[in-house]
Amino acid sequence: MTFKELGLSDPILRSLEDLQHTEPSEIQRQAIPLILSGKNVMAAAQTGTGKTGSFVLPMIELLQNHAKPYRKHVHALVLTPTRELAAQVRENVYTYGKFTSITSAAIFGGAKIFPQKSKLKKGLDILVATPGRLLDLHNQKAVKLNQIQILVLDEEDHMLDMGFIHDIKKIIALTPSDRQNLLFSATFSPEIKKLAKTLGSDLVEIASESANTTVNAIKQIVYKVDRNQKSNLLSHLIHSEQWPQALVFSRTKHGSEKIAKKLIAAEIKTATIHGDKTQGARTRALREFKEKDVQVLVATDVAARGIDISNLPYVVNFDMPTYPNDYIHRIGRTGRAGKQGTAISFLSIEEHKFLRGIEELIGAKIQQKIEEGFRPLEKKDSEKRSDNFKSKKSGYKKRQATKKVKTNFKKSETNSNKNKKKGSKAKTRWKKGKGS
Ligand code: AMP
């Protein structure tokens, strides 16, 4: 099956040729014809499967011969959970549509609002946006959503995880009800299914691989290690296995800075990307990483969404992700577009519950390893508690034994006192007797 057979026209085929995308991916094969025929689609597709192309390509095809939008109007809207993903999707629109007259822009928080307003002035074929900033701009009357023909909700599971549900509902209410709906998500919680129902009863469901499974090309390993040894294990693996590059996930912004500090101390060129960094610093870190000037990029989940780096060989979960869905998204950063990748997760004793959740979600057990020299010594809290209990118990026993000895001693003391008294009484009696 070729892109041409899917119904895409020459200007788009030319850009695909330039990108050397010779064959459509599975999700593209399924989604493109459906979207071109105007169907509402709900797709279970992970990042790394070519899902962006699966909606961007037919959207460009549908809109390229369409009348241009009026001032401040947009014809297609893609909602994404993060700035990085918004920028990434927009980049895809730009590259896939470079031989067409499609106009597009990305708008997101954390960047100056004025330039975004001016991009919207003339109207756009495709707008990619994060929900909060879009509502801001709509409230300021900088954008109009009542002529939208196609609405895409991308990485919907993350949008809901990040609490965007109310914003999304508000935005949907601002768009015409006869629009085409496209919903993409790596996983489908009951909440997403509920939202999908509000989009219409005629959603065609498709899946690139079965939902909630990880991309097969990714080798997954869990290293059991003590929490305080994780940084050392990371620099050890990078050095000893000569990793060319790695994307490392940290649960917190503060944690990512700490990891970076340790890696830099181990002479590994490292950058960080998280919510406390300015948009400029985040873009710079990402660029340096893509250009391979930086060997390791340490990121938080939110910041890392939308990072598309081809040929990324290693992804590291420095902390086990608390939400199993995040595991799928994180490791989807490697093994992209059919390439081999390795996902490493560091598991400290208190993180076992997270691993159980992940294995339940992916329906498989992940291989566990212990690296020579990094055997975990820490004990589970429950084990510590039982140890404590045992030592308390033995302490109690000891105390009881000492008490017993003391009591016995006291008893014998009292007895001997009694005897003494008895003795002195007897003596008195004897004296008395003697005296009488
Ligand atoms: P996505 O799942 O949209 O994040 O895409 C993952 C990566 O696959 C991106 O780097 C795309 O450029 C690449 N890609 C998308 N479609 C194809 C294709 N048909 N052939 C080769 N690479 C592709």
Image (cartoon, grey):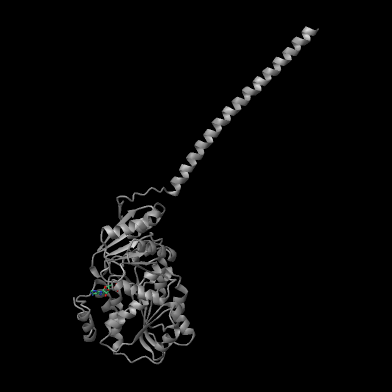
Q: Is residue 170 left or right of residue 30?
A: right
Residue at x 39%, y 85% (from the top left corner): 148
Quarter of the rendering containing residue 365: bottom left
- Expressed as whole percent of the image width and height from the top left, the position of residue 188 reads 37, 67
- Expressed as whole percent of the image width and height from the top left, the position of residue 380 reads 42, 49
Quadrant location of the C terminus? Answer: top right
Quarter of the rendering containing residue 363: bottom left
- Expressed as whole percent of the image width and height from the top left, the position of residue 340 reads 23, 65
Quarter of the rendering containing residue 198: bottom left
- Foreground: 310 or 97? 310
Using the image, determine if residue 74 lies above or below residue 210. below
- Foreground: 263 or 301? 263
Quadrant location of the N terminus? Answer: bottom left
Residue at x 59%, y 25% (from the top left corner): 408
Residue at x 39%, y 73% (from the top left corner): 196
Using the image, determine if residue 223 lies above or below residue 116. above
Q: Ligand 1 shows up in which quadrant of the image?
A: bottom left
Residue at x 33%, y 87% (from the top left corner): 103
- The extreme right residue here reads 436
Using the image, determine if residue 351 lies above or below residue 301. above
**Quick check: can you spot residue 193?**
no
- Expressed as whole percent of the image width and height from the top left, the position of residue 123 reads 38, 89
